[in-house]
Amino acid sequence: MLKRLIPAFALIAACQTAPAETVPEPAPAPEESSWRPVDPENLLLFDLGEDRVIFVELLPEAAPVNAAALREAVRTGYFDGEYFYRVIETHVAQAGREFDQAMEGVEELPLEAERETSSVGFDPLGSADLYAAQVGHRKGFPAAHQRGGEWLLNCPGAVGMARSEDPDSAVTEIYIPLLPRRYLDRNYTIVGRVISGMDTVNGLRRVEPSTEEEAEILFGEDPAAAAEAAEARAEKLAPNRIIAARVAADMPPEDRPAFEVMKTPSAEWTALKESKIDYSSISAYVQTPPKVLDICTLPVPVRPIFEHN
């Protein structure tokens, strides 16, 4: 009996003295950021001087032809020295070359106000809307999604393509709504949104566009009258002059501005939405507001990751 026990004791001792095999703990999964960087190829700068810069992010997938044309117009100096020549209180700010005579030879662009696309990547807002069956965001851009169709919305800061009555007559003249202009949805192509500098847009001098009579003088056969009219126009529009427009990707990396946009969906975005929906904790309210949110009242946050000088 004793001999039979010895091997067992030896085995136990061996187990006790052998070094224990350690299993490495799995590395923690990297925490996903709630922010996405803006592609410098889709970041446009409109410099109005005196530290007034309007930064626009394009969404090419929503309007590929128009977005590419606007980017190319910026690259070729289309807006340099031009103005926000039409700024209507509570309506829009419009910029470009204004006159048909100054846009001869500029290619007209097709209407790209709506497209067929999957709902993948579309983040519903969760509140009812007056203009569409469902609204939400795609990459931070206010959008509507309905029966497979999707379009960007005319919320304040949207960047749309102005045109004449013909739907396919845009020529890179742009407009920016100052207030919600949802009745324009699906009637004009939206190519992007202002992600920084909306204070500059709102601070533009309110001006009406030139009349046909003024245009005839400006481009008429009387040089003295044309020069006088051009001087008066320049003085009227001076605060709204675009010194230069650029694509961020064309700037040296050390001077290039950069931004991040809060992801939708993300935990931070959900928390922000909830904070703007639920006011039940505010004791001063006699009537607690309903838990709804208008798509145009809460822009998706943007933050700079490089201060533009």
Image: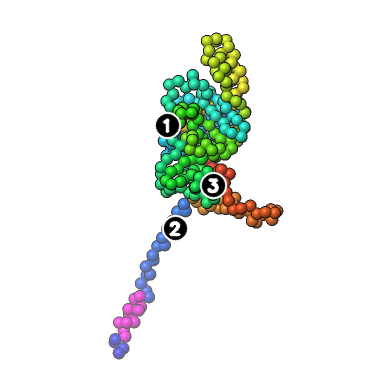
Give, as a single range, the part of the protein colored magenta: 5-15
**Disc number placed over residue 110 in the picture, else none:** 1
Q: What residue is disc 2 on?
A: 28
Identify the residue position indicated by label 3 in the image: 129
Q: Residue at x 43, y 47 (%)?
A: 147
35 with respect to 287 (left or right):
left
Specify whether residue 81 is in view.
Answer: yes
Colouring chosen for the image of the structure:
rainbow
Discs 2/1, front: 1
**Marks 2 and 1 in Cβ contact (< 8 Å):** no
* 7 is within the stretch colored magenta: yes
Is 187 inside the magenta-drawn segment?
Answer: no
Label 1, secondary structure: give it.
Answer: loop
**Most frequent secondary structure within the magenta stretch:** helix
Whether residue 301 is visible: no
Judging from the image, what secondary structure is the residue with disc 3 in? loop
- Dot 3 or dot 2: first in sequence order is 2
Disc 3 versus disc 1: distance between alpha carbons?
28 Å
Amino acid type, callout 1:
Pro
